[in-house]
Image (tube, rainbow, N blue to C red):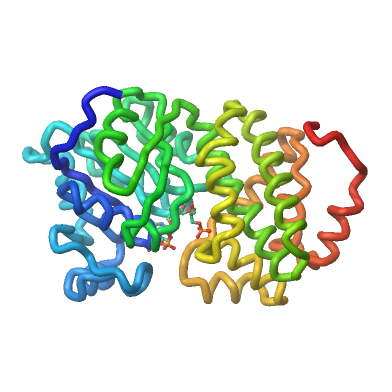
């Protein structure tokens, strides 16, 4: 990597949930950042209180961080006359919001400089990965990149160290993302394996629900380690079937994010599993969470995709059964244990 750029650039972050806010806070120390949210009242409250009480309470917004609910101003920040030579547009919404957000951008008919997305999952209904959604809406001419890896919003907002991976088939955009985001307490590695990076980030959320449920049922640390390891085997099988590189699943966006989300109590997906084990209904869990838990829609999308591709994903199927078919978590554990023995690498 040559010439890591140190000078400030214009960055717009679209989506003011926990992760968009944390990324905007972290980048505002080095760049001219504007954070956009779709809810006008919430953005007014953020502008006045200088915090995001709904999604990331307890963190003051840096004075230099701009906030807006005006999508024209947000996109103009990185496309207008003063955008400079290295602007960056970051989409920080959930997967369900990606297509509508991109359609909104497309309708504005402004020259989009590039787009980086932070969401983790498959689009429900189509089963598409985020990069496929981006291409379907914006076309191949807009360079796109996924930025993923083990990263709880609260820790990034606190300025604690973390390592991420940027994946893109555009070497220029990979370099730009590294140049702008790598620095301070954030390390950014790069990869050209969009599929591998996105599949790891998506399916680890389903495994975090499984591990949360196992921990909630007090099945022990041995069971947790077994679930994580066999979960990684499932992620790898699906990812390779979709065209990802096997090595990617051993990296930050595979094993790294899987470990974090399965074991870290800051994980919303893990919390879903813990609450399911206590017998709480999914609707109540999701309503109380107040945040997205991407593993929930992802479990349905992955179950359908794996069935279509003939990929064996018993843990994912068990999670989907508990989430959508009313299966009992204990019965699912018994079912998983009763499966025929098999070779570990099969
Ligand atoms: N929170 C984290 O630690 C973290 C870290 C890395 C990646 N991510 C990923 O980033 C994405 C966003 O997560 P988050 O933590 O910011 O979620 P969040 O629940 O904290 O916030 C979601 C934000 O998106 C908006 N939103 C919700 N549904 C939407 C929709 N259908 N269309 C448009 N906007 C919608 C909400 O208004 C809110 O501003 C997810 O895919 C998540 O997996 C989160
Ligand atoms: O809180 P979760 O479960 O959505 O996980 C957040 C991030 O994806 C962790 O890397």
Q: Is residue 230 above or below residue 174?
A: below
Q: Position of residue 154 (x, y in %)?
A: 39, 63
Note whether residue 72 is visible.
no
Furthest-left residue in view?
81
Quadrant of residue 286 within the rendered picture: bottom right
Q: Position of residue 193 (x, y in %)?
A: 49, 28
Q: Position of residue 298 (x, y in %)?
A: 60, 51
Quadrant in the picture for the N terminus: top left
Q: Is residue 59 above or below residue 143?
A: below
The residue located at (91%, 41%) in the rendering is 341
Q: Is residue 176 left or right of residue 305?
A: left
Quadrant of residue 171 within the rendered picture: top left
Note whether residue 96 is visible.
yes
Q: Is residue 279 left or right of residue 97?
A: right
The number of discs equals 0
Q: Is residue 37 left or right of residue 231?
A: left
Split into quadrants, the picture shows ligand 1 in the one at: bottom left
User: Which residue is nearer to you in this view: 159 or 71?
Assistant: 159
Q: Position of residue 14 (x, y in %)?
A: 30, 52
């Amino acid at each position: 990597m040559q010439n890591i750029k140190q000078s400030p650039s214009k960055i717009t972050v679209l989506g003011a949930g926990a992760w968009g806010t944390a990324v905007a806070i972290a980048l505002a120390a080095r760049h001219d950042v504007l954070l956009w949210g779709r809810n006008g009242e919430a953005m007014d409250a953020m502008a006045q209180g200088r915090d995001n009480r709904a999604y990331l309470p307890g963190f003051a917004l840096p004075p230099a961080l701009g906030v807006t609910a005006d999508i024209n101003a947000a996109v103009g920040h990185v496309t207008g006359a003063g955008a400079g030579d290295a602007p960056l547009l970051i989409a920080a919404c959930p997967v369900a919001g990606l297509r509508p957000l991109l359609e909104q951008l497309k309708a504005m008919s402004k020259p989009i400089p590039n787009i980086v997305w932070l969401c983790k999952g498959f689009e429900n209904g189509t089963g598409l990965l985020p990069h496929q959604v981006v291409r379907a809406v914006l076309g191949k001419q807009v360079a796109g990149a996924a930025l993923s890896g083990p990263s709880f919003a609260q820790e990034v907002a606190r300025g604690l160290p973390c390592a991420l991976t940027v994946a893109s088939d555009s070497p220029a955009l990979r370099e730009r993302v590294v140049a702008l985001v790598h620095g301070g307490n954030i390390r950014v590695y790069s990869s050209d394996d969009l599929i591998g990076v996105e599949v790891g980030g998506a399916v680890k959320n389903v495994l975090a629900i499984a591990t949360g449920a196992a921990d909630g049922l007090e099945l022990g640390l041995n069971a947790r380690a077994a679930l994580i390891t066999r979960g990684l085997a499932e992620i790898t099988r699906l990812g390779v079937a979709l065209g990802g590189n096997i090595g990617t699943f051993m990296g930050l966006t595979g094993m790294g994010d899987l470990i974090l989300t399965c074991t870290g109590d800051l994980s919303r997906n893990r919390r879903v599993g813990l609450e399911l084990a206590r017998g709480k209904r999914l609707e109540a869990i999701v309503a109380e969470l107040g945040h997205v838990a991407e593993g929930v829609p992802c479990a349905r999308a992955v179950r359908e995709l794996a069935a279509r591709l003939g990929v064996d994903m018993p843990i994912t199927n068990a999670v989907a059964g508990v989430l959508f078919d009313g299966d009992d978590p204990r019965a699912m554990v018994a079912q998983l244990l009763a499966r025929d023995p098999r070779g570990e690498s099969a």
